[in-house]
Amino acid sequence: MRRARQQETSEDREMRRAKDKVAKQVSRTQETVDNCTTRRKSMRVKMQKSRAQETEEAMTNRRDSNKARMQENRAEETPEASATRHISTRIRNREARAQETAETRTNRRILNRGKMQENRAQESPEASETRRISNREKMQEIREQETPEASATH
């Protein structure tokens, strides 16, 4: 199978991936919540093992191709699908954070801070200004929705 995939053309690869994607979407719509969680966990373990053996260059290439694929997928996404994805991601992250240890939390924050600094170092002055304005507006909305007791604790 590996040899056959090495010999396939880029068009064949795209067709195979498109078919696989549709088949996965169909099977996922029919699976139970427990099956979904189990599948996600076993996939996570499998991916961790393969990434542990990966070279730095392979890791960079994988991340770049994943990022490009994700951007393509999100560009094709309907607003409803986007909102649903945001909500389910938020729920999943909240559940994961509830189970993490103090050490894991610290490591996650350090990694996130590093990624954020990298991203900000690459952003244009216009993008930086837009981000700041957007953050300011978000924080203002949050403060407006707070109760007087909650704002007194800040």
Image (cartoon, rainbow, N blue to C red):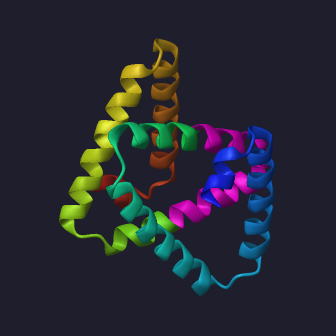
Instruction: Give the residue furthest to the left.
Output: 103
| In the image, residue 35 above or below residue 142 | below
Question: In the rendering, at what x and y percent does residue 86 appear?
Answer: 60, 56
Using the rendered view, name the quadrant where residue 104 is placed. bottom left
State the predominant SS element of the stretch in magenta.
Answer: helix
Q: Residue at x 51, y 36 (%)?
A: 64
- Residue 151 locus on image (x, y percent): 35, 53
Going by the image, does 108 lie left or right of 103? right
55 versus 43 height, above or below = above
Q: Is residue 154 visible?
A: no
Residue 96 at x, y percent in the picture: 40, 69
Q: Say whether residue 113 is visible.
A: yes
Figure check: 46 above or below 63: below
Q: Residue at x 29, y 37 (%)?
A: 114
The one nearer the camera, 153 or 3, is 3
Residue 103 drawn at (x, y percent) = 18, 63
Q: How many marks?
A: 0
Q: Which residues are magenta?
A: 68-91
Task: Specify whether residue 69 is painted magenta.
Answer: yes
Quadrant the N terminus occupies = bottom right
**Residue at x 58% of width, y 86% of height:** 34
